[in-house]
Amino acid sequence: MSESDDDQLQPWGFPPLSQQVQSPMTKAMRVLAFFFDAPVTWFKVNVVDKYRPAPYPYYHKKFRKVPAIDECYIDDYACIYEADNAFKRQRQVDFEILKILNYRFNRCLQWNRNINEWDNAGTMCLKEREVLHQAEINAAIKYGELGPTSNVIDAYMKQKHRLIWERRQKEKDQSSIAA
């Protein structure tokens, strides 16, 4: 074989299908497949794809549920890594929700204010103010004092210490009531 023949060979060293010796049955099957497939392919390429609108963007990437850090074994580094990434993703989501709530509150204030109403801003948008305040409290409880480089283990320890503190406070309250 010359080098020009090598250029015409497809992967695995087979010549193109048109140059292969084929049985009449194989040729008939190829013609029959082409007879049914060609019009459908032409219609899809020239009609359906041309007039199809742009696909609707899907913004929310779905992540599978990973185990929390308290469900991981000590030496299971893959589980700890996945839990840490899930924690960081959830932290980003929570802070984006805070930004959205803050934006809604500010838009409500701007919408409801006139030039002479700057003095009674405390009475406007009470629902949005309460939702934003509650979300800020929840974020402070969950992420407060952790810092930007914290990981899931730091957050788990913070949660553990908070639960211990709440249990001790409840015990102190019960002992002061009983005394």
Image (spheres, rainbow, N blue to C red):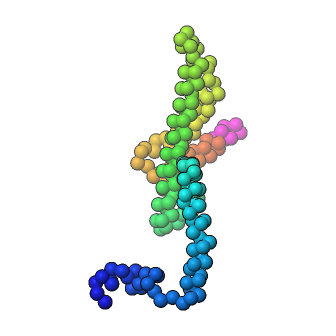
Coordinates of residue 101 in the picture (x, y in percent): 56, 34
Q: Is residue 6 left or right of residue 176?
A: left
Rendering coords of residue 10 (x, y %)? 40, 80
Q: Is residue 109 left or right of residue 7?
A: right
Task: State the image quarter where residue 100 is shown.
Answer: top right
Q: Does residue 155 lie above or below 19 as drawn?
A: above
Magenta segment boundaries in residue numbering: 172-178
Judged from this view, the residue extending furthest toward the right is 178
Q: Is residue 121 above or below residue 17?
A: above
* Residue 157 in view: no
Compared to residue 171, the image places residue 30 above or below, namely below
Q: Residue at x 40, y 48 (%)?
A: 149
Give the quarter of the figure containing the C terminus. top right
- Residue at image position (48%, 55%) is 85
Which of 18 and 111 lies nearest the eye of the viewer? 18
Total marks in image: 0
In percent of width and height, residue 31 lies at 57, 78
Q: Main secondary structure of the magenta part?
A: helix
Does the rendering let one see residue 42? Answer: yes
Write the residue at 33% across / 80% down: 7
* Drawn side of residue 140 relative to residue 175, left or right: left
